[in-house]
Image (cartoon, rainbow, N blue to C red):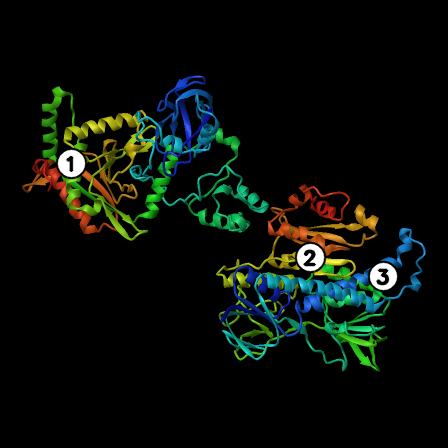
Amino acid sequence: MTYDLIVIGSGPAGYVAAIRAGQTGLKTLIIDKKYVGGMCLNWGCIPTKSLLESAKMMKKVRSAHEFGIAGIDPDSLSFDWPQALKRTNQVVEKLTRGIEFLWKKNGVEFLKAEARILSPTQVQADKRVFETKNILIATGSRPAPQNLFEDCIDLEELSSLKELPQAPLLYGRGGNLIELAQFFAMIGSKPVILASKLPMMPYLDEALESYIQKKLKKDKIPVLLEAESQIKDGMIVYKGKEYPFDKVLNISYRKAILPPMDIELELENGFIKTDRSHNSSIAGIYAAGDVSGKGFLAHVASAQAMEVIEAIQGIVPPQEERSYPVNVYTDPELAQIGLTESEIKAKGIDYKVSQYPLTTNGKALAEGTSEGFIRVLYETKYHEVLGVQIAAEHATDLISEAGILLELEGTTYDLARTIHAHPTISEIYMDAGKVE
Amino acid sequence: MRYIFKFPDIGEGLEEGKIIEWYVKKGQSIESGDPLVKMETDKVVTDIPSPKSGILAVLYGGIGDTVKVGSALVEIDIPGVDGEAAVAQAQEQPQVPSQEAVDEKDFAGVVGTIEVAGDGAYLPSGDEGRPAKADTPKARKALATPVARAMAKDYGIDINEVTGTGPAGRVMKKDIETHSKSSASINIHVPMPLASASERTRIEPLSQIRKTIARNMLRSKQNTAHMSIMDEVEVSELVAARARLNEALADKGIRLSYLPFIIKAITLALKDHPILNAELDMDNERIIYKNYYNIGIAMDTPEGLVVPVIKDADSKSLIELTKDLKDLMERAQERKLTLNDLKDGTFSITSYGSIGGYFAVPVIAYPQVAIFGVGRLSEKPIVKNHELAIGQILPISMSVDHRIVDGAEVSRFVNQVLSYLKEPLLLLAHEGGTQ
């Protein structure tokens, strides 16, 4: 028996590809050595958001008295780590069951085993050899190992801790690191960030990066630069000041997890090199998600996976890369889509920026979440919106409106003309659209 | 019951028609087959007959209005039909009524497919190569992004003509850029302030006939490999023969032009060169040879070029051809040609010389494969028996589709035609025979 497709890895690239493959009539087998749902469901997107929500709730409860709720003593609050984990696991379980149900419904077979690619048409797993017409490698990535500290854990191991550290040292770079630092700060720990390099989030517009840097400063979360720091007596010394820590979390930039294979695939910086249809250097072997080194975001992985199935069905994706939102679940959240200001400058486009703060937004003020702003970047000729950046409590949801706008090549006029309900946070779009 | 008669699909490719004249009034009693309205379509001006007998209850549209195929034209009250029958009739397809239960009265030419052949011949005016229209103008708003719309307006591009590559065919800004680049070299748009339009230019919408001519010309140039040949023939004998014949036929009121002689010469030669009376069917990789000789004659009318067809021209005498030509010419001027007059041409002749012009490169009436052009007859010095003499010189120009007609073949064909014109008695030698 020959499969049409064997998917290796069941994260947001793999499981989406398998479901879509089943829906379109491909005989599909998905293999994962550990989890259903990969990092996204098991220790990435979903669990971290669930844990962050617990921390944000704690922060809110701490300021409950401002909203007229008496009887809560902020000093008596403590973070119940096991309970926060329990709730998180319930959320994860529900979602994993959902995926397994969808696989079954669409005729996708699932095998929990380690897969080995023997040839472009053969995959070995569970001591058996499976024949297939196509292979999708969706094995994801893990943080690059660091050599500054002897002992460290990564995000995957965080949930196995019985107790949370009091002064965690967060080493690395990227949005996850800032999210985690704020998480620890909100629940009352004293996190320290040791940044391997600045900017912390090079894929974000400088406006968002500098905004979050200020926010960290305001929240008294120290950001130390690796190049200017020394490790001495179990402490970091930075600019003459000592920073103690009791646990190191490695949140470094990511490295591809390659499945064992007897074939040779062309790599690029350690990631599987793919073309626009996500085909690797061997025809019929595709790669999507982190393992191909493009995006490092669950929704980008899923979008690539959909294109892989289309490619197998003979549909060639459009040449230009599509724009996708980049979300960071900090406090307040950061979100952006389209081009950043420096990208627009590099292209030599005449542009303007319309920036609007949340401090005049009725709903934000009422909710006590008026921290943040919107930035709409548009070219000056037709006023086409080229990029949108938001810092706001629910920026990650607000950005969707900009997604449609960019997909449809919309202008600031369209933003200004669209009637937005009052009072809503989304009114900031309309306000930002009213230019000239 | 009330019967709604919708403007029928009277032929291939027709989408709309313009009301020229109503023959009927509201409240009038009509019989099935009575003409209701005179419509100008892409091809012709034609009468639309009533499919039913009854009382006219509603007339849709005034003179000059454009009616889409499938839109209601009239409503007819039919006495004595109700209940299920009424429902059944009301659900009939729009084009069905015109094809059934219609009395034949002068109607034969309207129903049925219309061939685009027969109306492509003209003198080129140098505007070949314009980009093909993506589609006929759509009444619906084109699906396009806001930026694409703004850009199209800016560039002066009709967004309906742009092929969209976005989801569901949405026109994206990239499509406008591509379109403007592809048409820039040949279709330079100069934005024109409307205020000055009245002073130095005049804007007129295209007539249906002009739209058809434009489409057919472009189609011919895009689908065939034009090759042209030109020659001259001394026709003193023909001039003399025609003069004698006209003298003899004067009391019958018949006056022959040169065209019937040329038609005779061509139909005779076509029988020896069947590839010039054929059609190339690329889709099925075959050649369709036609054993009938329907000769299209390009005619100038105030509205533009039409190419009515003389059917079975090979079996008609010079006198019959003259009568046919006169009839078609008169009806072309009065815009009374039917679709039947225009279809099924197998070869075309354009005699531009009657207006002026010596040589030309005529455009083939695609899917035909050849067109014969006749220039102005004039006296010219010739060499006869090693001496200068005055000759009657007829210039001819011929275009063929080089994909299936080879150069040698068309030269042999032209030689044969010219030999008949040079010695018109030869025409007589073949008259009535099958060879």
What amino acid type should be assigned to the residue bearing mark 2? Gln
Which amino acid does the dot numbered 3 rest on? Met
Q: Circle 3 sits on which residue?
A: A58
Q: Quadrant of the C terminus of chain A?
A: top right
Residue B339 in sight from this viewpoint: yes
Residue tagged 1 = B264
Q: Earlier in the sequence, mark 2 or mark 3?
A: 3
Q: Position of residue B10 (x, y in %)?
A: 37, 33
Residue B243 located left or right of residue A258: left
Image quadrant where residue B114 sits: top left
Identify the subunit bearing mark 3.
A
Foreground residue, B396 or B71?
A: B71
Secondary structure of residue under mark 2: strand
Mark 2 vs mark 3, CA separation in Å:
27 Å
Q: Identify whether B384 is placed above or below B319.
A: below
Q: Residue at x 13, y 21 (%)?
A: B252
Location of residue B116 with respect to B46 vertically, above or below: below
Q: CA distance from mark 3 to mark 1?
A: 102 Å
